[in-house]
Amino acid sequence: MASPPGKSQLSPSILSANFARLEGDVKSVEQGGAAAIHLDVMDGHFVPNLTIGPAIVQAVDRITTLPLDVHLMIEEPDRFLQSFRDAGADWISVHLETSTHLHRTVTRIRELGASPGVVLNPATPLVLLEDILEFVDFVLLMSVNPGFGGQAFIPRVLPKVSDLKKLISRRGMSASIEVDGGVGPENAAELVRAGADILVAGNAIFGKGDPAANARDLLRRMREAEG
Ligand code: DX5
Ligand code: ZN
């Protein structure tokens, strides 16, 4: 994944953007220093909400050169990997809870030329990463129960980030840690200190004020935490 080593990155979630002026919102976070654009795909089955499909991913791909970080919250993700890749997805993450043949799924994502990631819900333990960690480029830890933007961060995920960091370094691996849900100015620094490499933020960036300024503010806190 294209990133300067040791620098944490911001991947704004357009779930909380204004879809009637998506281009402006995406350009704005680009100017604010975003490293990727996070797109939340929900199917109304795995999570109790419906959001975007490949058509919107493709539309976003046309308005930005940033990598598209596509978070699939869908059952049977294998059926749609090709479509999302064709639409421009660069990072594709699938939930461990939805994937019966997870190794096959992440291998397929890599074969399609995208970076594979595995996502864990807040109540899914790290121990389940044992046999898949070496096959993914990143692990996405959910810090809310997926389905909606604007929910409160679940504090238990903070020590989970440090535990995952230790697990990755103990095994001599280089997988990045992404954290998604309830991330904002009040917890960005401690998440980076705990070992998060990529922070996703929706409401904190698009909820109020200027998205570019909000992104810059989060990044400043992240940089300070890096020391
Ligand atoms: C939740 C999504 C998140 C969400 C984050 O199911 O996966 O990406 O957009 O939004 P905030 O930052 O508002 O919690
Ligand atoms: Zn997400």
Image (spheres, helix red, strand yellow):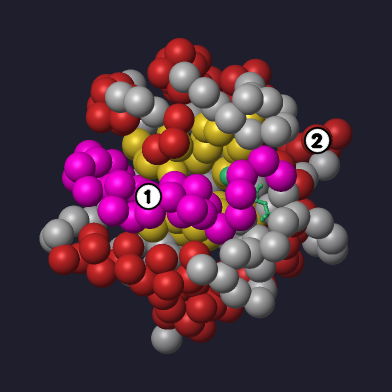
Picture quarter with ligand 2 = top right
Please tell me whether mark 1 sits on a helix, a strand or a loop.
Answer: strand
Mark 1 or 2, nearer chain start: 2
Residue 67 drawn at (x, y percent): 48, 40
| Residue 38 figure quarter | top right
Towards the viewer: 82 or 156? 156
Comparing 99 with 12, the one in front is 99
Spot occupied by residue 49 in the image (x, y as percentages of width and height): 72, 32
In the picture of the structure, the residue carrying the numbered disc 2 is 19
> Which one is in front, 78 or 54?
78
Characterize the local packing of mark 2: few (<14), some (14-19) or many (20 or more) Cα atoms within 10 angstroms.
Answer: few
Residue 143, image x, y percentages: 56, 58
Of tags 1 and 2, the one toward the viewer is: 1
Quarter of image, res 151: bottom right
- The quadrant of the picture occupied by the C terminus is bottom left
Q: Which residue is mark 1?
A: 139
- Please say whether residue 54 is visible from this viewpoint: yes
Q: Is residue 223 left or right of residue 218?
A: left
Labelled pair 1, 2 in contact (Cβ < 8 Å) = no
Element type at mark 2: helix
Q: Is residue 127 magenta?
A: yes
Find out if the beta carbon at label 2 lies less than 8 Å from the nearest ligand 1 atom: no
Question: Residue type at mark 2?
Answer: Phe
The stretch of residues the image draws in magenta is: 120-148
Decide if residue 52 is in sight here: no
Which residue is situated farthest in the bottom direction here? 227
The amino acid on which the numbered mark 1 sits, given as a three-letter code, is Val
Q: Residue at x 28, y 42 (%)?
A: 136
Q: Residue at x 76, y 37 (%)?
A: 22
